[in-house]
Amino acid sequence: MPDEKIILDYSQPKTLCVRLNGDWLIAAELPRVDPVIAEVSLKDISRITFDISGLKEWDSGLVAFLLHLIRQCQVKPIQVDLEVLPEGVKKLLLLALKVHEKTETVKAEEGSFFTRIADMVLKTIDGVAVLLDFLGETAIAFGRLLRGKVYFRRDDFLFILQRCGADALFLVSLISVLVGIILSFIGANQLKIFGAQIYIADAVGIGMVRAMGAMMTAILMAGRTGASFAAELGLMQDNEEIDALQTLGVSPVEFLVIPRVLALVIMMPLLTIYADLMGILGGFIIGISLLGLNPVEYWQHTQSAVTLSNFWVGLVHSFVFGIIIAIAGCFHGIKCQRSAAAVGEATTKAVVSAIISIVVATAVITFVCQILGV
């Protein structure tokens, strides 16, 4: 080779010894690897070794040169011996090649349609197993809580209660009033045909108290509080704070998950009652102002329609939704991978899984209530 920094030695059969000389600094003009590859292609070479006796200073320029050479040799294929290289160079090369192997593995996994389906099924089974394990840990932690053996900070719990409750009142008020207004308008269009607009009070009252108040509050809290839980715990996982708790002998489920689940279980029924009142108020405003209904008569119809059974069904909805939202947020947060992208993915999964679970739970509770005649 004409470049004095590289000397190629073919003295051994089927082996090329690359002698590296001088300083290999990125600031200086370094030789290109293409001429070396071109010359190797013309020879019957199966192995490349290095001689660094003449090598002086080096930086990432040498690493980039060798990495390019190794990747080109992997295509041939030609074995590259890295043993004699400086320890720092070997570590950087192995790290770069490991990342490359990961990328190749991901590409190789993109197989046939049935392979992808099988991988999806296996991942789903593994995910269900991890979820069941998390639910078991949470159940055990709640058992320890009832026995007074769970430790978490009281100030943190009160702060989470405030975030789940008082801080959400404005959004709950806005959404609930609008839902009550929408229900009253929809009912008015249909009941006007029969001249029975006064029964809007019944429709709005039963709809809000039995299902809509709890469901709209739950969807709002899933997007607000559930996502917050997932992001917080995911960031703690990324910063290795959860590992630090385990090292100190503190259970992350007891210290981080239990206060959040407990806070949502306490606040969701209260927020649901408040949402019911705001929804009824929204229907009352539309019924009185735009539909010309009598306020006293509207209130009497609401009282007669909203029975205790409807009220308790709504509270059962809210209690179940609180557990679902907290579990979804904490599970995806605490099982998050350690990267910024993984935190965002965990937050998205927490919201999506919570909303889907809320809809499914609503259908199940409604079906059970229909069977029981409640």
Image (cartoon, grey):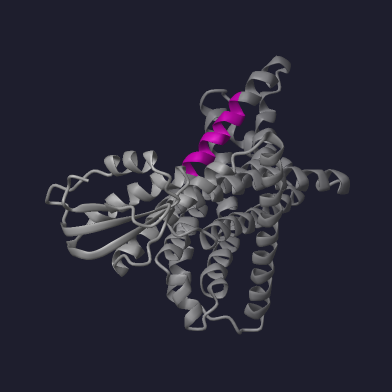
Instruction: Residue 305: name its quadrant.
Output: top right
Please state which of residues 103 and 276 is positioned toward the viewer in this rendering. Answer: 103
Q: Report if residue 178 lies within the magenta region.
A: yes
Side of 125 relative to 41 (left or right): right
**Residue 321 % position (x, y):** 64, 53
Which residue is farthest top? 193
Please state which of residues 321 and 234 is positioned toward the viewer in this rendering. Answer: 234
**Residue 246 % position (x, y):** 51, 78
Q: Residue at x 72, y 37 (%)?
A: 114
Which residue is farthest left? 28
Q: How many marks?
A: 0
Q: Which span of residues is magenta-colored? A: 173-185
**Residue 157 % position (x, y):** 48, 70
Q: Report if residue 298 lies within the magenta region.
A: no
Q: Is residue 300 visible?
A: no
Residue 178 vertical placement versus 95 (above, below): above
Please state which of residues 286 and 141 is positioned toward the viewer in this rendering. Answer: 141
**What is the magenta segment's predominant secondary structure?**
helix
Residue 113 vertical placement versus 79 (above, below): above
Q: Residue at x 37, y 62 (%)?
A: 82
Q: Is residue 40 visible?
A: yes
**Residue 117 % position (x, y):** 70, 40
Q: Residue at x 48, y 51 (%)?
A: 101
Please state which of residues 70 and 305 is positioned toward the viewer in this rendering. Answer: 70
